[in-house]
Amino acid sequence: MAPLPSPPTLTLSAIYAAYEAEHRDGFRDHLGASLIGKSCERALWYDFRWVTLVQFPGRILRLFETGNLEETRLVRNLRMTGATVLEVDPETGRQWRVEAHGGHFGGALDAVAIGLREAPKTWHVVEFKTHSAKSFRDLGAKGVAVSKPQHWAQMQVYMHLTQLTRALYLAVCKDTDALHVERVHADRSAAERLLDKARRVIEAQRPPSRISEDPTWWECRFCDHRAVCHEGAASESNCRTCLHSTAIEGGWHCARFDRALESSAQRAGCGKHLLIPDLVPGEVADAGEDHVVYRMPDGTQWVNDARDGV
């Protein structure tokens, strides 16, 4: 019989627990440009509407931190070549940010650079990424547009919203420390399609169609929202999953109380929360101002009751 692995030490457990304690709920206030390349608009809508709370263990959160720490080194590597690399906007002293659709869509650039050996006079959007060995090999063989279409889409959005025409994709293999450098040209029509896609997701009051009705489809199998989308699991309860809320210019609005919703209020929700009906795996049988009755697939009834809420 093989020996059992040793349990984690108290110190190791405490380190991972600290990462988990520091981690917020993971919900973004906006629909991120880093996500818009997803092929399933329903998954994007679930992201934007805070339908699924994804909990990462401490080890994975630390791995994310490693990717962020690598950026400082990659900036230094580019500067070693003589390039000028700006990680922050000199006018604001903060990270470069772009946004669209009333602030509901956007993202933060890793950097912008000029003086690159391939095109010394051209400003570039700079995007840093880390890869596993398998992913890095695929990237080298196919290029970023084919191998990592979400990364390519992210850069297209950044170029479009900054009015730059080139991007530099600098990737590192976490296993070998090898680097991949690739210049990407702006594709205006692709960027406009991505912005249109973001608008559709943001303005949709109901979830768009799934990419597949088959839960075994590979994108569905690895999707964070699989349980809600295909298995009838409960969604999170917050203002964005409530049928009273709407994304408006610059924020969110609650029709039930006719007021603007700050980010903290959206997360907290209230006692009058009523789920968007499409998030309930049943048919609406009856409804009132503060309740909705559903007929569930097994024949039972479920009442989303907010009549006594405050």
Image (cartoon, rainbow, N blue to C red):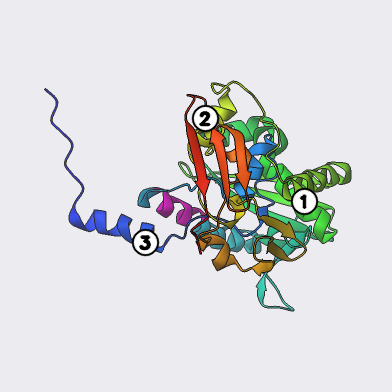
- Decide which of 25, 261 is in the foreground and name it: 261
Q: Say what amino acid the circle numbered 2 marks.
A: Met
Residue wearing tag 2: 296
- Residue 166 vertical placement versus 46 (above, below): below
Q: How far apart are marks 2 and 1 (CA)?
A: 42 Å
Q: What element carries label 3?
A: helix
Q: Which mark is residue 21?
A: 3
Q: What residue type is labelled 1?
A: Val
Q: Inspect the magenta stretch and tell me whether residue 185 lies in it.
A: no
- Of the two numbered discs 3 and 2 on the same chain, state the one appearing first in sequence: 3
Residue drawn at (21%, 48%) of the image: 8
**In the image, which disc is placed on residue 129?**
none
Q: Which of marks 2 and 1 is nearer the N terminus?
A: 1
- Please identify the quarter of the rendering in which residue 86 is found: bottom right
Whole-percent x, y for residue 159 in the image: 80, 54
Q: Where is residue 65 in the image (x, y as percent from the top left)?
A: 46, 57
Q: Residue at horizontal 60%, vertical 47%?
A: 47
Between tags 3 and 2, which lies in front? Answer: 2
Callout 3–callout 1 Cβ contact below 8 Å: no
Q: Which amino acid does label 3 sit on?
A: Ala
Residue bounds of the magenta highlight: 60-67
Residue 299 rendering spot, x and y as whole percentages: 49, 25
Label 2 crowd bin: few (<14), some (14–19), many (20+), radius 10 Å: some
- Tell me which residue sits at (66%, 30%) in the image: 210
Tag 1 residue? 157
